[in-house]
Amino acid sequence: MSSRERILGRVRRALADAAPADADAPIERGYLREHGSRSVAETVELLAENLADYRAVVHRCTAAELPSVIGQLLADRKAGSVLVPPGLDEAWLAATDVERVADRAESSPHALDRVDSVVTGCAVAIAETGTIVLDGSPDQGRRRITLVPDHHICVVRVPDQVVGSVPQALGRLDPVRPLTWISGPSATSDIELDRVEGVHGPRTLEVVLVEG
């Protein structure tokens, strides 16, 4: 008898006396949808705090200031090229003359790796976890364009795209879309807990919270 057969046998014996599940029974969802009560301003502050805890760089501005903020972030990075999703508001890049690179299906991983930065919007931002969620909408592009380039600038509209908790975020998301959940820049640790960033995503994540 294989290990697999032994384990499955134990599972069957453990479930022998269990009542069969009713596939049509409603799922109990009596859990808390948010921890505590916060104002909109407090929710946004919590998001900014948790983003920073995850080593994302947080910026705040008005809608009118957004183009200059993005232009300055690209200049500070000395970016020579920026990847642009097809539905990104062109006005966001009005203050920079950095070379635009389109999100093309035929772009190879090596071609994407040569791009210095990528600018996207987001689907929703979760305050309690400091998480940004992308869903592949036109202002966010394909999943890979936010995983290969080393520098990601993500714009979050405040307060419309900010929610307090994961359950609230799930209520806004379409589960059939390609969801990418981002909590800070890509990072991992080896057995000695040495942190290494940029292993399976951008080394630098900059989040711009835009009011108005």
Image (tube, rainbow, N blue to C red):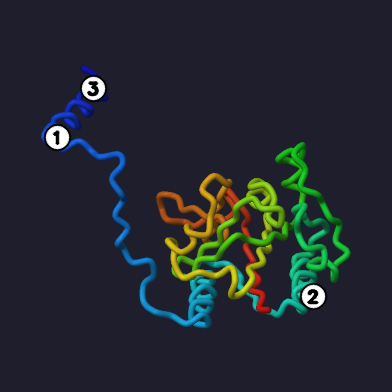
Q: Which residue is mark 1?
A: 14
Q: Residue at x 67, y 47 (%)?
A: 142
Residue 192 placed where, x, y %? 41, 53
Label 1 crowd (10 A; few <14 / some 14-19 / many >=20) = few
Q: Quadrant of the C terminus?
A: bottom right
Q: Residue at x 36, y 72 (%)?
A: 35
- Observer-nearest of 165 and 59: 165
Q: Secondary structure at mark 2?
A: helix
Q: In the displayed orientation, state which residue is furthest to the left.
A: 17
Q: Is residue 5 above or below residue 26?
A: above
Q: Which residue is mark 3?
A: 5
Q: Secondary structure at mark 3?
A: helix
Q: Are marks 3 and 1 in contact (CB under 8 Å)?
A: no
Q: CA distance from mark 2 to mark 1?
A: 62 Å
N-terminal of the pair, mark 2 or mark 3, is 3
Q: Residue at x 18, y 26 (%)?
A: 9
Residue 64 placed where, x, y %? 77, 79
Q: Quadrant of the N terminus?
A: top left
Q: Which of the two discs, 2 and 1, sits closer to the camera?
A: 1
Q: Are marks 2 and 3 in contact (CB under 8 Å)?
A: no
Q: CA distance from mark 3 to mark 1?
A: 14 Å
Q: Residue at x 78, y 63 (%)?
A: 89
Q: Which of the two discs, 3 and 1, sits closer to the camera?
A: 1
Q: In the displayed orientation, state which residue is furthest to the front.
A: 24
Give the left or right position of residue 99, taking residue 171 as reference.
right
Q: Which residue is mark 2?
A: 68
Residue 28 placed where, x, y %? 29, 55
Label 2 sits on what residue type?
Answer: Ser
Q: Secondary structure at mark 1?
A: helix
